[in-house]
Amino acid sequence: MASYKYSVYNSAKQGNRGGGGGRGRSGGGNKRRGEYIDPARFVQAAKPIEETQYEAKHRFADFEVASIIHDNLTAKGYEFPSAIQDQTIPMALEGHDMIGIANTGTGKTAAFGIPIAHALITRQNAKALIVAPTRELAQQIEDEMRSIGKGGGFTGALLIGGTGMGSQLRDLRNKPRIVIGTPGRIKDHMERGTLKLDQFNMVVLDEVDRMLDMGFVNDVSSILDEMNPIRQSFFFSATMDPRVQGLIRTFSKDPQTVSVKSGDSSQNVNQDIVRASGTSEKMAKLHDILLDEKVGKVIVFDETQRSVERLSNELIARGFSADAIHGGKSQGQRQRALDSFKASRTKILVATDVAARGIDVADISHVINFSQPQSYQDYVHRIGRAGRAGKIGHALTFVG
């Protein structure tokens, strides 16, 4: 049986067009006007939520899916599903449209990945599109789908920015049955005529709220408009604000909702401010903070691609183990920086907001806002990179 495979694509000329692969959407290179945030909102003691152990109603072995999927799940060591998986998978296998409200790190990918892989293996007419806000998240989904569907006999394509075009165009000519990508890049292919979605009858929108925050609402709507009207849809989001609700109402039919969100991860984070005026004082105080032995793995946020690059170079010149990640880097550069950070070869990752949206690293001790976020929602998302896996994190925000 043919093995499951993917190739990676995108045009070099589009490598600088945003962290999420969009066409000119804020990839960290353009300054945008933000809302005023009272500095007092950046000061808060951690209020960790005591999590109760979820008792699954099923085992993965109970799900009625193709035997090869069971083999793959066993090889991955999967025995008991998480809450989102336990409640979503049975209804998804029945063909329901699904809404999942859950934080990052709750196992969302397998919640939709297992039903999709089963459909692709057992129904020859099944074709799936998975849309994620960032390159990094799209790659994480691709890795998980590869392991779940290994040996399933279907091929796919990954449509993200920052990599070469040739291999991706080849994969699209091979009529992939699963496509994973970012909204802007998917839309680019639709406009070029290299991707036709009318036969795709399964769709996943992961982190819908983040996609809308990043300005992808029109692209997402255009993508869904072009898909087969008779389809199964999955929507996953950490929040259900009116924009998300409106999108779901327009593009789903009688969806079932599973909510397992236990609160914002920022509640596990001690938050404080650092007062500094002028670049020199900010840099001196950042230097001292990073020397503190209590500071482990750190993300430092700055505003633009250029400022991120400058700050990273300055930290390296001062002897710190640092790297930068932003929308102006190629996907290979971004992936190498992220891999090094995950493996703790690099202690400090300097990032723009958009580039950091797909970062899911469990052992980040500190988030430092060297520049203030553009909105309070961006702030909550930034500091939520720390305080994971039951640990208490720390967030420091520089204010004038």
Image: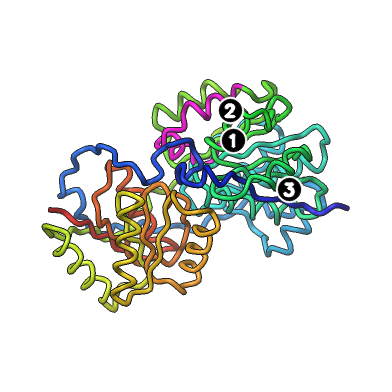
- Nearer mark to the viewer, of 2 and 3: 2
Mark 3 and mark 1: Cα distance apart in space: 32 Å
Front residue (pair 100, 221): 221
The reply to whether discs 3 and 1 touch (Cβ–Cβ < 8 Å) is no
The residue under the point 39% across, 31% down is 241
Q: Is residue 374 above or below residue 396?
A: above
- Residue topped by disc 1: 186
The x and y percentages for residue 318 are 28, 75
* Magenta region includes residue 217: yes
Mark 2 and mark 1: Cα distance apart in space: 8 Å
Q: Residue furthest front?
A: 13
Type of amino acid at the residue the image marks with label 2: Ile
Q: Residue furthest right?
A: 1
Q: How is the image coloured?
A: rainbow
Q: Secondary structure at mark 1?
A: helix
Judge left or right: residue 275 versus residue 217.
left
Q: Secondary structure at mark 2?
A: helix
Judge left or right: residue 124 versus residue 211.
right
Q: Give the residues drawn in magenta, as a range.
A: 204-225
- Quarter assignment of residue 25: top left
The reply to whether discs 2 and 1 touch (Cβ–Cβ < 8 Å) is yes
Please tell me how many numbered marks the rendered image carries.
Answer: 3
- Residue topped by disc 2: 223
Chain-order first, disc 3 or disc 1: 3
The residue under the point 48% across, 43% down is 20
Front residue (pair 190, 70): 190
Q: Is residue 49 above or below residue 365?
A: above
The x and y percentages for residue 59 are 68, 55
